[in-house]
Amino acid sequence: SRHFTIAIDGPAAAGKGTLSRRIAETYDFHHLDTGLTYRATAKALLDAGLTLDDEAVAEKMAREVELAGLDRDILSKHEIGEAASKIAVMPAVRRALVEAQRRFSKKAPGTVLDGRDIGTVVCPAAPVKLYVTASPEVRAKRRYDEIRGKGGIADFDAIFEDVKRRDERDMGRADSPLKPAEDAHLLDTSEMSIEAAFQAAKSIIDAAL
Ligand code: C5P
């Protein structure tokens, strides 16, 4: 069947989630936030009281993740994100999740996958690849505003340190480090509104469809 894949990668809190959902809605494509697959694996381990350092056990959990049942609200907790980025360094976990993500990417009429390695590893032949980024300061500020906006308590410095630590872990790992694919369009949203970023992405996609 005919399918068109849009690969969206970038660091934590760069705005890929919002952008990906909006693109999927606009083109009526299926959307997968691949970060949720790592988060679901991590949560299953934490819930079962298992340690995060046994690769064979983590792989088994990864193989049991159901893509249809991923719930952003349940998986958004900070501890789960931290645990996810720890198990995401394990090649066996990545192999298991990448297999499921590739199967998802072939749905008709098209798919939007967002994560860290979609353009480089999961869907290297995707006709459209976007690398969405913003400075660590701007990303930390957005996360800070988001938490405050929901009435929560947030410490900017702690969030900023967190963003940088997550970047180091994601960009520094040996298996599938976060980096733009050679043929990715770079979208730096540091000084761009969500609307402007969406319009820029839309022109790139429309030119390739
Ligand atoms: O995007 P999100 O913050 O939900 O992802 C959680 C963690 O999962 C990331 O910090 C990263 O380590 C890992 N991840 C990954 N590859 C992806 C998506 C997420 O390694 N494609």
Image (spheres, rainbow, N blue to C red):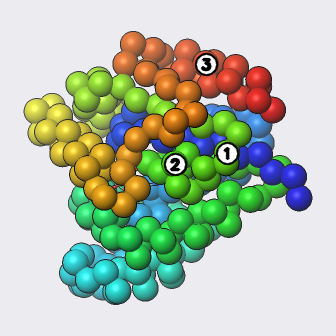
Q: Earlier in the sequence, mark 2 or mark 3?
A: 2
Of badges 3 and 1, nearer the viewer stands: 1
Residue type at the position of mark 1: Ala
Instruction: Report the side of 108 relative to 143 (left or right).
Output: right
* Residue 185 rendering spot, x and y as whole percentages: 56, 27
Give the image quadrant in which the ligand numbered 1 is located. Answer: bottom left
Contact flag, marks 2 and 1 (Cβ < 8 Å):
no
Instruction: Count numbered badges in the picture.
Output: 3
In the depicted structure, whether residue 107 falls above or below residue 94: above
Q: Secondary structure at mark 3?
A: helix
Instruction: State yes or no: discs 2 and 3 in contact (Cβ < 8 Å).
Output: no
Residue type (three-letter) at the residue carrying disc 2: Thr
Instruction: Classify residue 142 by image quadrant.
Output: top left
Does residue 186 sit above or below 183 in this rendering?
Answer: above
Q: Position of residue 17 (x, y in %)?
A: 50, 41
Say which label, 2 or 1, has the lower sequence index.
2
**Amino acid of disc 3:** Ala
Find the residue positioned furthest to the front. 182
Tell me the residue that label 2 is attached to.
120
The residue at which mark 3 appears reads as 200
Looking at the image, is mark 3 or mark 1 earlier in the sequence?
1
Residue, x 26% and y 43% (percent of image)? 167
Residue that carries the numbered disc 1 in the rendered image: 126
Q: Residue at x 44, y 68 (%)?
A: 94
Cα–Cα span, label 2 and label 3:
21 Å
- Quick check: can you spot residue 92? yes
Residue at 77% in and 37% down: 27
The quadrant in which residue 87 appears is bottom left
